[in-house]
Amino acid sequence: MSDETDLADEIINITLQAQIEQARRPHETASATGFCLFCGEPIAEPNRRWCDADCRNDWELENRDIV
């Protein structure tokens, strides 16, 4: 039988896991614009959001607290 402390702990763990999952997906909130979202270079491929992995990583680093 669970007591109030166990239930509260379970809620905290569920909330924490949801926040961790959300923090790992910052790039999913950014839409492709035809330009690199970090440096602004034009991108020929319509569904790409960054020109390379370095720009993607830098963008995610700068935006990790926003999402």
Image (tube, rainbow, N blue to C red):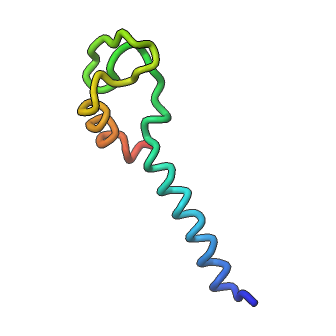
Find residue 64 and report its horizontal and vertical position in percent: 37, 45
Find residue 17 and report its horizontal and vertical position in percent: 53, 62
Spot the residue most to the right.
1
> Closer to the camera, 43 or 4?
43
Find residue 7 and report its horizontal and vertical position in percent: 67, 79
> Closer to the camera, 66 or 34?
34
Locate residue 5: give its quadrant: bottom right
> Residue at image x 34%, y 39%?
60
Q: Is residue 30 above or below residue 46?
A: below
Q: Is residue 31 above or below residue 7?
A: above
Quadrant where the image shows the N terminus: bottom right
Find residue 38 and report its horizontal and vertical position in percent: 29, 26
> Residue at image x 27%, y 26%?
52
Locate residue 58: give its quadrant: top left
User: Total label count?
Assistant: 0
Q: Is residue 65 above or below residue 14?
A: above
> Residue at image x 33%, y 24%?
50
Q: Is residue 18 above or below residue 39?
A: below
Left or right of 62, for residue 32: right
> Residue at image x 63%, y 70%?
11
